[in-house]
Amino acid sequence: MSSSVSDERRAQLEALITKLRPAVQADGGDLYLASVDTETGRVVVGLSGACSSCAISTTTVKLGVERILKAKLPWVTSVEGDIDTSIGFDESVRLGTGAYVPISIRKS
């Protein structure tokens, strides 16, 4: 693969991740590109902040980020998550904004 194709793929990926970040940031976390192999299509995204302690972070990566990246960038073959553990659990929890409200307690 030429370096120009690889550079173009990386730029497309970074632009798409930039568009996805606000949704993750709304819950007190963040999303970043940890690594990419533009030849094999393997992408590793990082989750930080409140996402590093979230019970559904794997679901966010697989059913959210991976689904969108594969749909928009056909060369992407797999997406894995890399959790940032540089902050403690208590600090991570405090970063959350409480945007998620379980269906059973939502008001109609």
Image: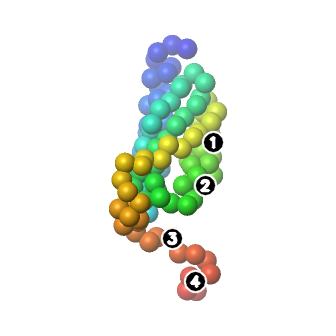
Say the numbered circle drawn on residue 105.
4
The quarter holding residue 33 reads: top left
Residue beneath the point at 49% across and 21% down = 6
How packed mark 2 is, by other alpha carbons closer than 10 Å (few <14, some 14-19, many 20 or more), is few
**Mark 2 residue element:** helix
Q: CA distance from mark 2 to mark 1?
A: 17 Å
Say the numbered circle drawn on residue 71.
1
Mark toward the start of the polypeptide (1 vs 4)? 1
**Mark 4 residue element:** helix
Mark toward the start of the polypeptide (4 vs 3)? 3
Quarter holding the C terminus?
Answer: bottom right
Does 2 sit above or below residue 20? above
Q: CA distance from mark 1 to mark 3?
A: 25 Å
Camera-side mark, 1 or 3: 3
Does 104 sit above or below residue 2? below
Does 66 sit above or below residue 7? below
* Amino acid type of the residue tagged 2 in the rendering: Thr
Residue beneath the point at 49% across and 35% down = 13
Mark toward the start of the polypeptide (1 vs 3)? 1
Quarter holding the N terminus?
Answer: top right
- The x and y percentages for residue 89 are 41, 60
Mark 2, residue position: 59
Say the numbered circle drawn on residue 100.
3
Residue in the foreground of this view, choosing between 93 and 88: 88
Mark toward the start of the polypeptide (3 vs 2)? 2
Inspect this view and state whether residue 96 appears. Answer: yes
